[in-house]
Image (cartoon, rainbow, N blue to C red):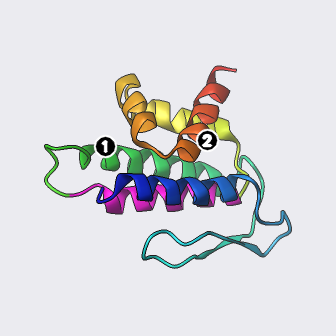
């Protein structure tokens, strides 16, 4: 991933801001993400903050599917770089956080899509803020 230290730091800041509820729970309110490298910030529309909504379930499944793609393109044996997949994960997690979705939905989706070793690998290569969100989601399944 190009410059992993810089990318991880930028992603950590972005996810941390999202997880810290930078938006309002009112309908129609947007949540703004921070810049990431050369990419400008973006506003995420928040129309529904029901933690178990269809949109939350869809975001959880999309993140799990994106995680599998990220892992498939990560490492020395990969045919293409993992950066675009990481960017997609970052965006999918931002939507999940902006909607204030139930972490258990994400944890279950990850457990269904990824093996235990793949989940450990994802946690190892995610930014510290993203990994913290994922650990909480996985722990919520066991609670």
Q: Nearer the viewer, residue 98 or 28?
A: 98
Q: Nearer the viewer, residue 98 or 39?
A: 39
For the residue carrying disc 1, how many other residues have a C-alpha within 10 Å: few (<14), some (14-19), or many (20+)? some
**Residue 10 drawn at (x, y percent):** 51, 60
Write down the residue under mark 2: 133
Q: Quarter-wise, where is residue 137 in the image?
A: top right
Q: Residue furthest right?
A: 26
Q: Nearer the viewer, residue 81 or 91?
A: 81
In the image, the segment drawn in magenta is 81-98
Write down the residue under mark 1: 71
For the residue carrying disc 2, how many other residues have a C-alpha within 10 Å: few (<14), some (14-19), or many (20+)? many
**In the rendered image, which quarter contains the C terminus?**
top right
Q: Nearer the viewer, residue 108 or 73?
A: 73
The answer to whether 101 appears left or right of 13 in the picture is: right
Q: Which numbered disc flags the more N-terminal residue, 1 or 2?
A: 1
- Label 2 sits on a secondary structure element that is helix
At 17% across and 48% down in the image, what residue appears? 78
Magenta stretch secondary structure, dominant: helix
- Label 1 sits on a secondary structure element that is helix
The answer to whether 35 appears left or right of 68 in the picture is: right
Residue 11 belongs to the span the image colors magenta: no
Residue 137 drawn above or below residue 37: above
Q: Is residue 1 visible?
A: yes
The answer to whether 36 appears left or right of 22 in the picture is: left
């Amino acid at each position: 991933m190009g410059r992993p230290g810089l990318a991880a730091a930028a992603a950590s800041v972005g996810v941390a801001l999202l997880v810290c509820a930078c938006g309002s729970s009112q309908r129609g309110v947007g949540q703004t993400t921070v810049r990431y490298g050369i990419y400008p910030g973006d506003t995420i529309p928040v129309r529904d903050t029901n933690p178990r909504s269809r949109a939350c379930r869809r975001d959880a499944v999309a993140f799990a599917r994106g995680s599998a793609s990220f892992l498939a393109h990560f490492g020395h044996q990969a045919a293409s770089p993992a950066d675009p997949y990481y960017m997609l994960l970052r965006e999918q997690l931002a939507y999940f956080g902006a909607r204030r979705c139930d972490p258990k939905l994400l944890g279950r989706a990850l457990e269904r899509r990824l093996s235990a070793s793949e989940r450990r690998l994802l946690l190892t290569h995610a930014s510290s803020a993203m990994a913290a969100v994922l650990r909480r989601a996985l722990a919520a399944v066991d609670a």
